[in-house]
Image (spheres, grey):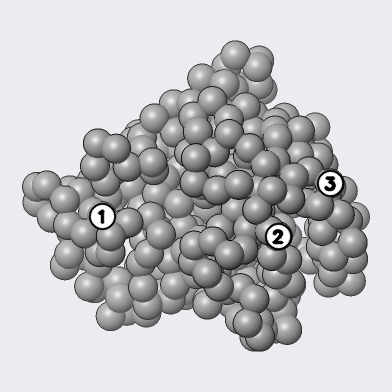
Amino acid sequence: MSTAYITHPACGLHEMGEYHPECPERLDAIGDRLIAAGLEAMLSRHLAPPVTREQLERVHGAAYLDSIEHASPREGLHYLDPDTALNPHSLEAARRAAGAVVLATDLVAGGEYRNAFCAVRPPGHHAERHRAMGFCLYNSVAVGAAHALAAHGLERVAVIDFDVHHGNGTEDIFANDPRVLMVSTFQYPLYPYSGVEDPAPNMVNVPLPAGSGSDRFREAVRDIWLPALDAWAPQMLFVSAGFDAHRDDPLAGLKLVEADYGWVTRELCAVATKHAGGRIVSSLEGGYDLSALGRSAAEHVRELLAG
């Protein structure tokens, strides 16, 4: 079984301003690096379908979904907060991003592929049940995890988030859900300044100070994440794959390198092999230095292919 690679041209049409770091070129950087690394030909490409309203309502409130649709502009930009804007193509991009994770879940849970990577945008892990924020509109990974539980009869899934920013939206959606374990590392203090005050028992949050680097990140994974995941024995893993903890990224300062993303992916593949038949669905979150993003995502995909 190969690795499914799911994307859609609509994800390149969402823009939030000329100098916004969450830009369409991010997907080009990943695609170009996969070609340069000789990995693109090994992947099985799929176009992302649009997510359905039913799939979105598993994790987002109906009133929120209505409000964001009504806010979609016919031209120009409409700002939902100082960091998050809609252009006329944004909702279609977000629908395809969430739909990519649903399709990935179906393909992996159905046994057609061992794992999948969704090269999509906008990202999703800051989107709460009732609020868009932090560049995010729909919480794509949460939509996929909820779909696995509802449509594939799974009883235990795990969400792994190694973005440099705390996945507050995913935590908001799944806090105290007995079917979901979430493990995460993030720089703290840093936007969205959450994740450290009395998290729910199914949230394994590991805040790291700026400058932590590879050793402290790997120690957190080995000593905290992996024992928690092993005890949970997830039937499927969902990865919020943010690459903005890289030392070259302009928005943070954890100082990871691309080898760290390869290493953590190998560790997660081992967990998936032990407990979940190898089943992993990964979706792009952050990463704003284009070269570092491409290199890091390529190492992540390389290990998924090997897993």
Secondary structure beneath dot 3 equals helix
Q: Around disc 2, counting alpha carbons within 10 Å, would you say few (fewer than 14), some (14 to 19), or many (20 or more)? A: some
Q: CA distance from mark 1 to mark 2?
A: 29 Å
Q: Amino acid at mark 1?
A: Ala
Task: Report the front residue among 60 and 261.
Answer: 261
Where is residue 119 drawn, in percent x and y?
A: 51, 39
**Vertical side of 245 occupied by 233: above or below:** below
Q: Which residue is mark 3?
A: 215
Q: Around disc 3, counting alpha carbons within 10 Å, would you say few (fewer than 14), some (14 to 19), or many (20 or more)? A: few
Q: Amino acid at mark 2?
A: Leu
Q: Amino acid at mark 3?
A: Asp
The answer to whether mark 1 and mark 2 are in CB contact below 8 A is no
Residue 275 shows up from this direction: no
Q: Which residue is mark 2?
A: 208
Task: Report the front residue among 58 and 163.
Answer: 163
Secondary structure beneath dot 2 equals strand
Where is residue 176 drawn, in percent x and y?
A: 64, 85
Q: Residue at x 21, y 59 (%)?
A: 79
Which image quarter is the N terminus in? top right
Q: Around disc 1, counting alpha carbons within 10 Å, would you say few (fewer than 14), some (14 to 19), or many (20 or more)? A: many
Where is residue 2 drawn, in percent x and y?
A: 70, 32
Say which label, 1 or 2, has the lower sequence index.
Answer: 1
